[in-house]
Amino acid sequence: KNTEERLKVHKMKKKVLRKQVRAQHTLMRHEGIECISHATQSLVIANAGLGNGMSRHQLLKIVEEYGLVETLLMPPNKPYSFVKYGTTEEAKKAFDALNGKEVTLEDFGQNIVLYINFVEKVFWQDAVPTNLPPGLMVIEKIISPEEERRMLESIDWTGNEDTQNAQKTLKHRRVKHFGYEFCYNNNNVDKDKPLPGGIPEICDLFLEKCLKQGYIKHKPDQLTVNQYEPGQGIPPHIDTHSAFEDEIISLSLGAEIVMDFKHPDGRTVAIMLPRCSLLVMAGESRYLWTHGITPRKYDVIQASELGQKVGTITPDVGDLTLNRRETRTSFTFRKVRKIPCNCTYPSVCDSQREQRRQVLQPSFPHSEMEASKLEQEHVHKVYEEIATHFSSTRHSPWPQIVDFLRSLPKGSIVADVGCGNGKYLGINKDLYMVGCDRSKNLVDICGEKHFQAFVCDALSVPIRSASCDACISIAVIHHFSTAERRLAAIRELVRLLRPGGAALIYVWAMEQEYKNQKSKYLKEKNGSKDKEEEINTDTSQRPLSDQMPDSSSQDSAYSDQLLSDSEHKGCDAKPVADSRLPVHTNRTSFHSQDLLVPWHLKGCSKKKEERTDKVLVPAGSKGSQELSPVFHRYYHVFREGELEAACRTLDCVRVQKSYYDQGNWCVILEKL
């Protein structure tokens, strides 16, 4: 029995030593601080940080049992803390008692094990107090506890959803609208459909006070009431410029909260909003900075103020602790804007962005010259700019195209017209494949992969007639802007084929929902941002088509007539005369056959001149407001039967197969 006990103790000591070493490596990696083997006055305590739920109050209670604590440093969001004792003997006493000791986190009820190491003196840079964003104010005790009680009781959360006050239960909070409903699908309000009843009368006295004190210039006509349980929050955002006027005010009722603000240049400010306080956002803080509440059950706050200090949370590691969140209700008042916003922050203003887009948006071409110019600006130049980012999203071949290439006889000569980054050029080593593309930068990428490719226009391919056994044209022909040019591209493919040769053509389909099945493009509307450039053609991860959009924008509402298969009527749906090309909204059904599809250029490190096909807008990833170039690519999406009908207008061509493949219309044709 004694042997078993000794073995158990030995194993425990080995485990503690192993964890100590791991904690040493973590500290060196995070802070560049090296642990030492001899005793000093200073200790680092792993698993006892704000980042894993240890409050300053509890840790002080633990470490003060072994001597006088001169300093306790708790870095924000880190799983360790530093303690300095008055003497080395006291530090050694704490080391011997606490290393490997299991304790229970008071606020979580979770058991953790402490691992201790000695360090030399810990030098921590003094935290510099941060300023409030310009135009932001926090006013304490704007209402009395009695007024707070009455306002909270005035909101009935027990009613059914879809009531006259547009009550909703969202992922991270409950919300109720008064005056006008804020629509989260387009982040705006329907200004022509006010809700009955308006803002509750109980708010009148409070709003009169705000007008009298000059916190707002106009009486609000829209109120959003949000209720947050502990662990809930709201993503970082800027209230839509076109929806609301300048001043936005928000009451914090029931509990205090920390709200995070972020400037486009990366600066962040955490601001304490005490209970019964008023947040006023105007000017830069309203129009340029994002604001949000991180979903969590505890906030990191100043220990000396216990969460009641108005203003920013200074990251002072010697004065930070955790504060348990309670149920909080916010009353946010806004004035609905009746005219477009003309603020001085155009880079993040949706009103001004739409005005620029209307100026930049091209019209449908009515001549060969206009068509060529449209394709030059909104196809050729765009792919030259986005080639590297585009290529990074086009790495997996589509199964049915692979099947076509693998079905060809050994030794076949195959031309990939519009080869992009060459992802099909190496599929079948038994074929002699050559690629061509209008984009020099994409062709250069093919060269880096040691593929044979050259630059040319798909309407004039410098390959001898009847010299190819097969051709493929994947997601190319939909970039031609007239029926005549699309037909000419198909005719050029046929010219390259020998008699009996076959061509496979893929184009983007108007019908993204076919036979009661949504395409993967629509299914991934709410997918992760990391995969927004790719969609699937089967159960494995495979990009669907080389035309996937990346950003949402204003959609259009005009649609075109359905084509017949008749040779006399041709293959093109006629657009409305003199209409501007609409900009498609990402991951939605198409409302027009001829349109512009946005592409957010990611990883853009250098600034380029403003061009007619590029607009700078805030990137949407995780709420960031970093400026990201958006390019618009022209597409003609094909209706069912349209591609097949175009092929049949050509002599010496037989359509072997026509099918739908996850959002694309596809044809295999044979040259007779």
Image (spheres, rainbow, N blue to C red):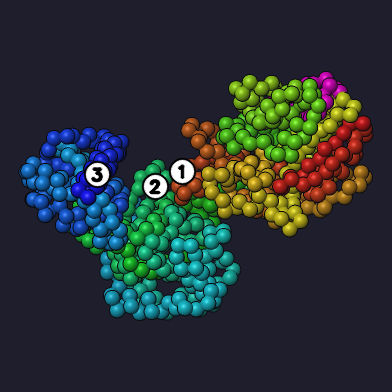
Residue 508 placement: quadrant: top right
Q: Where is residue 146 in the image (x, y as percent from the top left)?
A: 29, 79
Q: Residue at x 87, y 43 (%)?
A: 645
Side (left or right) of 118 relative to 551: left
Residue 659 placement: quadrant: top right
Mark 2 to mark 3: distance in Å?
57 Å
Q: Which residue is drawn at 25% across and 58% down?
A: 104
**Mark 1 — residue?**
626
Quadrant where the C terminus is found in the figure: top right
The vertical placement of 425 against 360, above or below, is above
**Most common secondary structure along the magenta stretch:** loop
Return the disc, 1 or 3, that comes first in the chain's sequence: 3
Return the disc, 1 or 2, that comes first in the chain's sequence: 2
Mark 1 to mark 2: distance in Å?
9 Å
Return the disc, 2 or 3, that comes first in the chain's sequence: 3
Q: Where is residue 218 in the image (x, y as percent from the top left)?
A: 42, 67
Tag shown at residue 263: 2
Q: Could you say whether the residue bearing mark 1 is in a helix, strand or loop?
A: loop
Q: Which residue range is magenta in the image?
A: 455-472
Q: Nearer the viewer, residue 450 or 337?
A: 450
Q: Is residue 443 visible?
A: yes
Mark 1 to mark 3: distance in Å?
58 Å
Tag shown at residue 7: 3
Structural crowding at the residue carrying mark 1, measured as other residues with C-alpha within 10 Å and reported as few (<14), some (14–19) or many (≥20): some
Q: Which amino acid does label 1 sit on?
A: Glu
Does residue 462 show up magenta in the picture?
A: yes
Q: Nearer the viewer, residue 101 or 336?
A: 101
